[in-house]
């Protein structure tokens, strides 16, 4: 795993927690911010996945 995959997953978990707290408190702003954080985390994790695939492909082909 690379740093973007890890940071993205952390953002997703943190966002889910924030969304849940917002739902429990009845705070629509926290719910929305939690969903946005989850989305940002998903995007970052996807970017990290792409980086990893590119790195793996380069290693497989013998290039650095």
Image (tube, grey):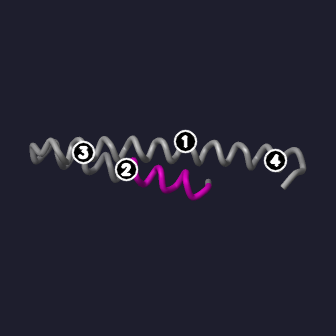
Residue at 85% over, 45% down: 60
Image quarter (top left, top right, bottom left or bottom right) of the N terminus: bottom right
Mark 1 / mark 3, whichever is N-terminal: 3
- Magenta stretch, main secondary structure, is helix
Mark 2 / mark 3, whichever is N-terminal: 2
Outermost residue toward the left? 26
> Foreground mark, 3 or 4?
4
Mark 4 / mark 2, whichever is N-terminal: 2
**Label 4 secondary element:** helix
Q: Circle 3 sits on which residue?
A: 19
Residue 4 falls left or right of residue 38: right
Q: Quadrant of residue 49?
A: top right
Q: Quadrant of residue 31?
A: top left
**Mark count:** 4
Residue 57, x across and y down, in percent: 79, 43
**Label 1 secondary element:** helix
Does the stretch in magenta take in 5? yes
Task: For marks 1 and 4, give the CA distance.
Answer: 18 Å
Q: Circle 1 sits on which residue?
A: 46
Mark 3 / mark 4, whichever is N-terminal: 3
Tag of residue 62 = none
- The boundaries of the magenta stretch are 2-12
Task: For marks 1 and 3, give the CA distance.
Answer: 21 Å
Tag of residue 58 = 4
Residue at 39% over, 47% down: 12
Task: For marks 3 and 4, give the CA distance.
Answer: 39 Å
Q: Mark 1 and 4 residues: CB-CB less than 8 Å, in contact?
A: no
Q: Circle 2 sits on which residue?
A: 13
> Quick one: label 1, few (<14), some, or many (20+) residues within 10 Å?
some
Mark 1 / mark 2, whichever is N-terminal: 2
Residue 58, x across and y down, in percent: 81, 47
Outermost residue toward the right? 62
């Amino acid at each position: 795993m690379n740093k973007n995959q890890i940071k993205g997953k952390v953002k997703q978990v943190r966002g889910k927690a924030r969304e849940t707290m917002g739902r429990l408190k009845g705070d629509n702003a926290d719910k929305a911010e939690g969903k946005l954080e989850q989305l940002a985390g998903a995007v970052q994790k996807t970017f990290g996945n792409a980086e990893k695939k590119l790195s793996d492909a380069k290693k497989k082909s013998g290039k650095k």
